[in-house]
Amino acid sequence: MTRILVVDDEPQIVRALQINLKARRYEVHVAASGTVALKVAAQYPPDLVILDLGLPDLDGVDVIRGLRGWTEAPILVLSGRTDSTDKVEALDAGADDYVTKPFGIDELLARMRAVLRRSNLAPDQPVVTIGGTMVDLAAKRVTLDSGEDVRLTPTEWHLLEVLIRHPGKLMSQRQLLGEVWGPGYETAGGNLRFYMGQLRRKLEADPARPVHLLTEPGMGYRFEP
């Protein structure tokens, strides 16, 4: 049974999540503060954390950092903060995705399934498909269903590989720039937009309406298998 830790100080939200998650056969633990959340997580290691940022004792970002010190369990932020700065800060601290309150339970469950799929995938999974295109991470080769090879530049390949190794995860611009270009490029968003455009032209069936290499405005990008 998948174990979920819900961290929120709003009783109505906690109760609604408990009812919906237990009805779907999840094991649910709850905490109304950051301090309690860290203790519960240590006692009952979660498979997924649903975390509000506005807690009464600790900022949710500090809770993310505390959890990331010892666990790779997906963290789904659930918060009333709508400023993209808060969202990016949470993602940079190690959150996997972000849902803004008020939210629909169907959307939340879909986001949960996505981050859980990511956590269950082997990190060294060698072959991934993007529509009709096969990406072989071990051979560093991209092949269309027609058998034709797709030529990627080293930067395009590095960016694609980072996204593919985190399927379903929302990656902030800062994270991607740091991993692909290194220190000093954290604000070079133009580079990222250019190379994402190049990848879409080469890999998406309709680059203007991508279904695998997605943009989350103001936050970053994600790869949807």
Image: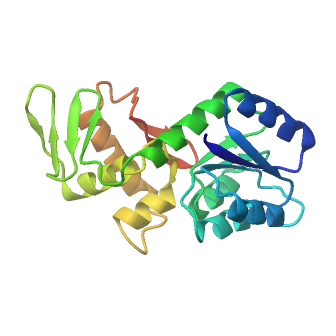
Vertical placement of 30 versus 110: above or below? below
Q: Is residue 62 visible?
A: yes
Q: Where is the C terminus found, in terms of image quarters?
A: top left
Q: Is residue 75 left or right of residue 55?
A: left
Along the line of sight, the residue nearer the viewer: 21 or 59: 21
Q: Where is the N terminus found, in terms of image quarters?
A: top right
Vertical placement of 181 versus 219: above or below? below
Vertical placement of 123 versus 212: above or below? below
Along the line of sight, the residue nearer the viewer: 200 or 147: 147
The residue that appears at 48% across and 61% down in the rendered structure is: 175
Q: Is residue 49 left or right of residue 81?
A: left
Along the line of sight, the residue nearer the viewer: 80 or 28: 28
For this orientation, the residue located farthest to the bottom is 183
The location of residue 191, given as percent across then percent down, is: 37, 56
The location of residue 67, given as percent across then percent down, is: 65, 65
The location of residue 161, given as percent across then percent down, is: 30, 52
Q: Is residue 104 visible?
A: no
The residue that appears at 13% across and 45% down in the rendered structure is: 151
Q: Is residue 139 left or right of residue 173?
A: left
Along the line of sight, the residue nearer the viewer: 199 or 142: 142
The residue that appears at 42% across and 36% down in the rendered structure is: 224
Vertical placement of 163 versus 13: above or below? below
